Amino acid sequence: MLLRLAALAALTALGLCAAPAPAEDGHQLWLRYPLLKEPWRSEYRAAVAQIVDCTAGAAATPSSTLLLARSELMRGLTGLLGAAPPLASEATESRALLLGTPRSCALLARARLPLRGLGREGYAIRTLLRRGRAVTVIAANTDVGVLYGAFAFLRLLQTHRSLAHLEISSRPHLELRVLDHWDNLDGSVERGYAGRSIWDWSRLPDDPDPRYREYARACASIGINGTVLNNVNASAQIMTRPYLVKVAALAGVLRPYGLKVYLAARFSAPIEIGGLTTADPLDPAVRAWWASKVGEIYRLIPDFGGFLLKADSEGEPGPQDYGRTHADGANMLADALAPHGGVVMWRAFVYGRLREDRARQAYDEFVPLDGHFHPNVLLQVKNGPIDFQPREPLNPLFGAMRRTPVMMEVEITKEYLGFATHLAYLGPMYEEVLRADTYAQGRGSTVARVIDGSLFGYRITGMAGVANIGADRNWTGSQFDQANWYVFGRLAWDPTLSAEAIAEEWVRMTFSNDPRFVAPVVAMMMGSREAVVDYMTPLGLAHQMASGTHYGPGPWVAGNAEPDWNPVYYNRADSSGIGFDRTASGSDAVGEYARPLAAQLSSLKTVPQKYLLWFHHVPWGERLSSGRTLWDELVLHYTRGVDAVSAMRRTWSGLAAYVDSERFAEVAALLAIQQREAQWWRDASIAYFQTLSRRPLPPGIAPPAHSLAEYEAVCFPFSPGYPGTSPACAPANPVIP
Ligand code: BDP
């Protein structure tokens, strides 16, 4: 027995045998820094023999940001290597590591590194030869660049990359890389599936939660540099003095991590908290109120980022209430912010007063205003023309606004993709839209090139993600949803990165570098979003969720007063076929895209199958390129989605040896929920559409487990992330799921 134990210990020490991993709850995210196995540990120990504190003799005392960079490096190396390398004031050892800016580090100032191309936030990681000794340098023009560089360096070790001959230069492609928290002041989170808001307003300003620092650190590790603290459906209260003092305290905690604070503003705040009788953007008293409010904010928070606005949208107040335009509203706020260097992120998510097609509305309202916005306004445009669906084609506003900086908004929280309980890695979804070609300036005019400013020479650039973060121990409601926070940050830094490479990085840092784990998990992640598309809204369908809560299927729902709150409005299914005709013979939304793209999407022959029913109303019996009828293809897609979830479960069940038992069990439990709900989605959708298509299921395909009436009776009036009771929900005794 003793011999066996000794042998096991020896094997474990050699890294040849997986020891049971200690329980983890996911709180450490991708910044766990576990002790590396051999041969990596020895290799990296040799590569980083010493850390040089080169601040002596430099122009400035180290800032808190620089101190954070150094302590992160120490923390990371201590964890990964078992002990931190010694700190010295001179590079006495070969393989010393130096970090700083030419201002903070006299040695770096003398080294004359080519830092000019790195801008304000970029970094360089280089192996240099100094007096015959190899020295690794993490250098930047600014302290926050050094912090980003420190995280990037640690990532190399975390993912088992070689440290020999480093020649890395990296700078963000986008300026504003922002998380939008839809957090309400009462602690609830709109469309949040990870518990309550992390902002504990009642304890601020005096007692900031230590989590704020952890949050900021995680954001900095992936280059996120801004955070909108409150819901776009904003309460004016956030602009009152007591809250601004709290916001200032929070900003103070986040600042050293390079994270700027922004607020969602309520357009009618001058009435609600300012005592005015109007919020008309052209009214001098209103303008004066905003100017003074902004002045107050900047006295408290000198580096305040600016405002995010949801106006004239879903019942929120806006300039149209006074017969003014979006440009009038945005410019008024922009003028108040401009003297202080702040920006306005004005959302283009507008609909209502429905004309023919909701997918056309934002374009119709904003394109005539192109060129009318002041220089510090960005238009914040959702990735697709409707609303964060599992799949949408690109929003036609990308490519259409040539004189107004357009930033992209994506949802990280999975409101329409199964909440936190379904495993869906969103990297492929973000990548799909970033790489989509608008053809605005000919082939290659990708969305990435629109938002990075290179296509139209935008003055400011950015990308926003609706956060999936809450007070849950694991931050995001599930282990795998952390990957969506991660991939958002990485793609906002560099939209040309591949979703797959980012998934691999994340898996290695979050779970294990073992190839027997990495390969199957990355493959599982890469297919996971497509699985959701398949079991919820295949072939270009959209918005088939139950009303209000968006929990579960509701393709039959038709009773909401607003036509475009009804799934039937989107599926347009009847006995002749299914799909929304957006070609010239229908709403002609397709005409909002540039010519070659419009032509491709218009024709049944060339439209990509994934967008088929988004653009076309197709007869049930239509033969598709697969040779199958549309009906058969639809049913097979729903079924394929459920099968993909079964395959994910199988994959995961074989990986227990590589993960600690706590995280393993949690993922397994959530996959079981996902499987049940995927089946519910598939069965309910097929049951409904079959009443219209009146066609048999393809051979060998199992029928839905229940009748349509039973699916229609399923009712969940309360659901996470949804305030109140779902309007479409009648009391019932559901049997499913
Ligand atoms: C919708 C959400 C709603 C948000 C809205 C928005 O259901 O809760 O307020 O987006 O983006 O998808 O403003």
Image (cartoon, rainbow, N blue to C red):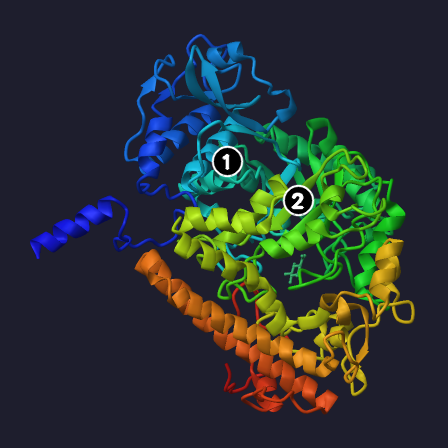
Q: Nearer the viewer, residue 64 or 670?
A: 670
Between disc 1 and disc 2, the foreground one is: 2
Instruction: Inspect this view and state whether residue 513 appears.
Output: yes
Q: Disc 1 marks which amino acid?
A: Leu
Marks 1/2 in contact by CB < 8 Å: the verdict is no
Label 2 amino acid?
Answer: Met
**The residue positioned farthest toward the top in the image shown:** 57
Q: Is residue 603 above or below residue 697?
A: above
Look at the numbered disc 2 and say if its residue's Cβ is closer than 8 Å to ligand 1: no
How far from the left and from the top, in percent, is residue 652? 41, 65
The structure residue drawn at horizontal position 60% and vertical position 83%, both measured from the top left corner, is 684
Residue under circle 1?
A: 254
Q: How many marks?
A: 2
Q: Please state the horizontal and vertical placement of residue 550, each as a whole percent of the image.
A: 61, 70
* 701 to 580, vertically: above or below: below
Give the residue at mark 2.
463
Dot 2: within a 10 Å radius of its alpha carbon, few (fewer than 14), some, or many (20 or more) residues?
A: many
Q: Which mark is residue 150?
A: none
Residue positioned 87% across, 53% down in the render: 594
Image location of residue 599, percent across then percent down: 88, 61
Q: Indicate the secondary structure of the residue bearing disc 2.
A: strand
Residue 582, by quadrant, is bottom right
Q: Earlier in the sequence, mark 1 or mark 2?
A: 1
Q: Secondary structure at mark 1?
A: helix
Q: Residues within 10 Å of mark 1 (few under 14, many from 20)?
A: many
Whether 15 is drawn above or below 340: the answer is below
Q: Quadrant of ligand 1?
A: bottom right
Residue closer to the observer: 12 or 29: 12
Q: Is residue 5 left or right of residue 20?
A: left
